[in-house]
Image: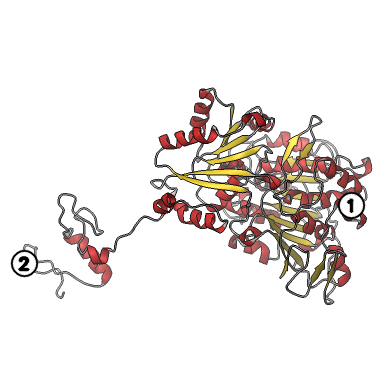
Amino acid sequence: MFLQDTTGNYNQGAADWSGATGRWAGGEGAAANRMAATESGGGENSSVRSRARSRSRSRSSPRYTRQRSRSPDYSYDQRDTTRSSEEEGSSEPEESESMSPEGMVVRREAGGLLEFDAPCTVKGVESFSEEEKRKLGRITTWEEAVERGILLQSVVNALEASGAARPTPIQQHAIPVIAGGVDVVASAQTGTGKSLAFIAPIVSKIGKMSSTVPRPFFPGRMAQASPLCMVLAPTRELAMQLVKDFESCSVSLEKGEMCRTKAAYGGETASRQADRICAEQLDVLVATPGRLLEFNETGRVSLGYVKFLVLDEADQMLSMGLEAYVNNILMETDLTEPNGRQTLLFSATIDNPNLKPWLEGETLLRKQRVTIAVGRGRGAGGAGGGMRCNVAQSVRVLRSDQAKDQALWEDLAKLDIASGEQAIIFVSSRDRGKDLHKRICGSGKLCCGLLQGKQLQTVREEVVRRFRANEDQVLVSTSVAARGLDFPNVTLVINYDMPESIETYTHRIGRTGRIGHEGRAVAYYNPASKDRRIGEALISFLRKYNQPVSEELEAAVRPRRHNFRRQYQGYRSDRSGPGPSPSSDRWSYGSSRQLDRSQERSGHRRPERDRSDGSSRYRSW
């Protein structure tokens, strides 16, 4: 393990980074053993697949589910696009953005709160030679990346034109390693540019090789796309966002260096989407796992030429239950083997135990890989990996919806609408979202949008467009927007309904304070509801990041407990637990049956002498 301090030096282990020379220093290690990417043929068509394999599939497999469905437009992505609306958070891109008149994604200049010298934990470089360590050493400027041949000048021009004056910490470390062809497992705080960390080097490498890689393509109804880069995203919102990022990064490429990018996701007719994807040969395909499986099995997309495989927001895929879909892609499609491709896994957290099968198995990553975690404490890959110090958090204890409504108007009144500030309000269900959206719009004070699951794609895009253009000052959303959407002017996030996990809470508040800007997050905690499930974790999370914890919140989460053993010796007459009788202030034993059950659990027996024959139920006490 190599822990980098703010001076650029690794203070532990054999490797040492010199910020002045931009080189890795350390003992000689074994040279990296990286095989050239295989160039196998196209993908199998579902009509010629083995029937035995089809019969042996589990009933829970995506193929079985699709065969059981009677709808011709059934999509694997029902879970990808609907379940996240209430239960799960959606994935997040990492750059703050707005739309220019030309339609190009424009990113803001990072604020002063972003730590460009944040500590970095790096593992896996000890096996590389000194020459390779120099190539994998971090970059500090875009000019350095061009001089070292890591990025194309046209890509750097696009980055600078979009407002990225210098690489962020995760970009400084990840871009050279990815350009070196090494598998990467990366983690960083949300809003720090993880997306560009893999997009920029991939676009540069594809720009150099796309014209030299022969791939068969026959236009027509049965055309088959063969991408060089396959990016898996958990939600369609993130998929569309990544396509915009790829396009903005490759907008300055010359004609011979084109990087054609398309997206595949649920919520849209599969046949129409397939025709659009296969209209011409493409270089990058960003897809949700379910829709990609469908296109591969029907022969519309071949993965036999994939040289770059990216899993973005891998922890979110697991939390949404997409592990089986990803495993099917890895093992049951024509995807190139791990030794024939470069695999990149990006996640807000990398110490999630559910990630172990992917990190320790042999189906996803090669044995020789580099693990990068940027941030402090648990922010470098822990359960709170999405937390940033520039988000001021507060929790209000409110015991009714009426109290929540009153607090909501108080918090919204603090928005500086004149300067373009916006707010996102998270709710737990579609019905609550509709009701709250109706009341905010009915007040006539603010323009409000509604984003939720099971919306038509055109409706979603219009809601996102209006909010991004600041036509709506408030956005009411289910957890579908907790990840995958990035709005530059959001300064306030309100958890009207608390999520069920601290990870979802983390990524909800990550919608504000992007790229070093300040933000504020307010949570409404009701101890009488299911919010109590997250209470203990919430207090620990707030204290972990030096956020205030009020006495009221502490009392609501941790009520005073009595010593029942010392004070109460009886059982309630109306229930099996200890407590006073509802009809009197006396403490009495409950029914014999209740007491017998309690004594059976403790190994004792109480004789019953109320039988008609006068005998005891048990011979001994």
Relative placement, left or right, of 412 versus 339 is left
Determine which residue is flagged by label 2.
614
How many C-alpha atoms fall within 10 Å of the one at disc 2: few (<14), some, or many (≥20)? few
**Residue depth check, mark 2 versus mark 1: number of the one nearer the observer:** 1
Q: Residue 560, how many percent across, how many down?
A: 34, 57
Measured as percent of width and height from the top left, residue 179 is found at: 84, 57
Nearer-the-camera pick, 10 or 227: 10
16 relative to 190, above or below: below
Residue at left 69%, top 57%?
Answer: 187
Mark 2 residue type: Gly
| On screen, residue 519 above or below 434 | below
Mark 2 element type = loop
Closer-to-camera residue (302/307): 307
Image position of 588 (left or right of 30): left
Give the image quarter of residue 454: top right
Which percent across, then down, holds residue 73? 64, 36
Estimate how packed mark 1 is, as few (under 14), some (14 to 19) or many (20 or more) residues with alpha carbons within 10 Å.
Answer: some
* Residue assigned mark 1: 143
Q: Which color scheme did the rendering employ for the protein?
A: secondary structure
Q: Is residue 25 above or below residue 594?
A: below
Count of labels shown? 2
Alpha carbon of mark 2 to alpha carbon of mark 1: how far? 98 Å
